[in-house]
Amino acid sequence: MAELRLADVLVEPATAEEVAERTGTHAPTVDRLLRTVAALGLVSCRHGTFQVTEAGARLRSDVPGSDWGAMMMMPAPWTLATWQHLPHAVRTGEPVFERVHGESFWDFLRSHQTEGRIFDAAMARAAKDQDVVGLVVDELERAGSTTVVDVGGGTGRLLAQVVAHQPHLHGLLAEQRGPAEQAAEVFAAHGVGDRCEAVVCDFFESVPGADGYVLSNILHDWDDERCVRILRRIHEASAPGACVLVLETLLPDEEEAVHPDSAPIHLLDLMMLLNFGARERSLSEYAQLLENAGFVDVRLADASGAQAVVAHRG
């Protein structure tokens, strides 16, 4: 459904023949597919006419922050090819992405533009959650931050939403050139083009100075040594008392029992191993990384299902 962009086509009711014409598919076969996804609740089917449901609309590719990117990325051949080498990763404790694809994960996305755009769309999905936006806004207000840097923040969607909620706040997107060049359009769409800008940088070497920092799904891509290196660059650039928010899905601490509800985070942990030789972490493990980089007063902020590990520069 995602690859054929059926959710886009079915915003308005259409017959199978109309869908086939718009998507370049075989009408009798697309009718079979539509009836299958109707049974799954992703489209409705009435008298031979189909229309996307609220659940199916999450797969629209033309809506920023939808699930389309994630649904394209997870079953993609290049993703599945990596998972086939899980036994090797378990035997060695080493990543396999470069072994499988001949280049690192990030180089792969740079050299495969279609896959890179899908990845960016998948990451934008993580920035759409209003609970996350609200948590970041509340913590920055509590800290009195006036300038916030979104470190490795993709095309700037999370940053734009946060700044839009705080009229006094200015935002800086610290990113590589590709995503940074797309940020102006995102900032303008959220009405914050005059208060946000993108700064092209390598966060292992330097980040802009500010009194607030957000790292959303960044540290789980790196091993402990490189995580501390990123955090030390932030510590060096930040103002005294600056607030740092680490937005990650947290693993249970080791003494906690493993619960079926935690299956998604454990699967993501294995994906971090496969792609980067990295890992998901518990609250205590993130606290240790932050303290090793010089930050103090580490705590968990938890509101309405969103979580952030919060720390300050002493």
Image (cartoon, rainbow, N blue to C red):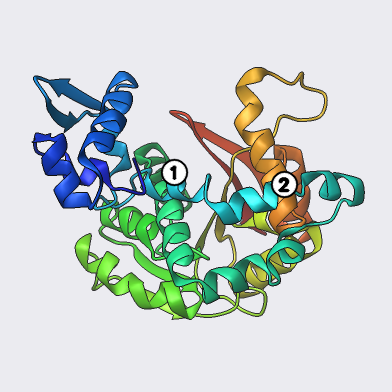
Q: Residue at left 81%, top 63%?
A: 225
Observer-nearest residue: 92 or 143? 92
Q: Residue at left 9%, top 38%?
A: 12
Q: Position of residue 303 (x, y in %)?
A: 47, 31
| Residue 27 picture quarter | top left
Q: Is residue 83 depicted above or below 307 in this figure?
A: below
Determine the secondary structure under disc 2.
loop
Determine the secondary structure under disc 1.
helix
The amino acid on which the numbered mark 1 sits, given as a three-letter code, is Met
Judge left or right: residue 48 versus residue 276: left
Residue farthest toward the right in the current orientation of the protein: 91
| Mark in front: 2 vs 1 | 2
Judge left or right: residue 51 versus residue 124: left
Q: Residue at left 62%, top 48%?
A: 80
Location of mark 2 (residue): 84
Q: Position of residue 274 (x, y in %)?
A: 73, 52
* The C terminus sits in image quarter: bottom right
Location of mark 1 (residue): 71
